[in-house]
Amino acid sequence: MLIDFENLLRYIELPRAERFSLMDGFDRLIRQIGQEVGEIVNVLVFVPSHLATAWAEDFHRLGFFTILCPRVINKDREEEDTTDTILMEFGRRTIRHHNITHLCLCSGDKDFSPFLREVIRQGLKIVIVAGNLTSLSNELIRLADEKKDGGKMVYILSSTKEE
């Protein structure tokens, strides 16, 4: 599971403050995908440095591996976000060196479409998680594989606490 955390955080639908728990949402999401799709080998959170400090302890408690993605100055002297690039490169290396059957991308960003097509060409099935349906690219929905009982392997991260 590869999580583009800033993308999820930007688009997750936030409830009233007293019912907010993103960590409960991740627990429910992991449980649901594990039951419906199968074992989740690793959860890797790709997070820009400005969000890392605020969330690192929660990710650690959840057993997620945190990958810091700094902003860098490019050759045009502009600040550039490295999250997408690092996530895709790490994903490519993971696929080459591990015997996995599915790749779960947690982002609604259509910029990941070419990467997911590479993954599909290598014979893996695609699972998608988004912050909400509105933020989810139609192209990513099309690239997601079908569930055994019908429907797409597309999940929405809910941030509400269980009652």
Image (cartoon, rainbow, N blue to C red):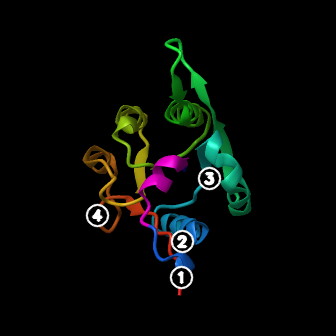
Q: Dot 1 lies on which element?
A: loop
Residue 70: which quarter of the image? top right
Nearest to N terminus: mark 2 or mark 4: 2
| Label 1 with label 3: CB-CB less than 8 Å | no
Q: Nearer the viewer, mark 2 or mark 4?
A: 2
Disc 1 residue type (three-letter)? Glu
Disc 2 residue type (three-letter)? Arg
Q: Dot 2 lies on which element?
A: helix
Disc 4 residue type (three-letter)? Gly
| Few, some or many residues within 10 Å of mark 3 (<14, 14–19, 20+) | few
The residue to which callout 2 is attached is: 28
Residue 117: which quarter of the image? top left
The residue to which callout 3 is attached is: 41
Residue plotted at (46% across, 74% down): 15
- Nearer to the camera, 142 or 15: 15
- Relative to 46, is 43 above or below? below
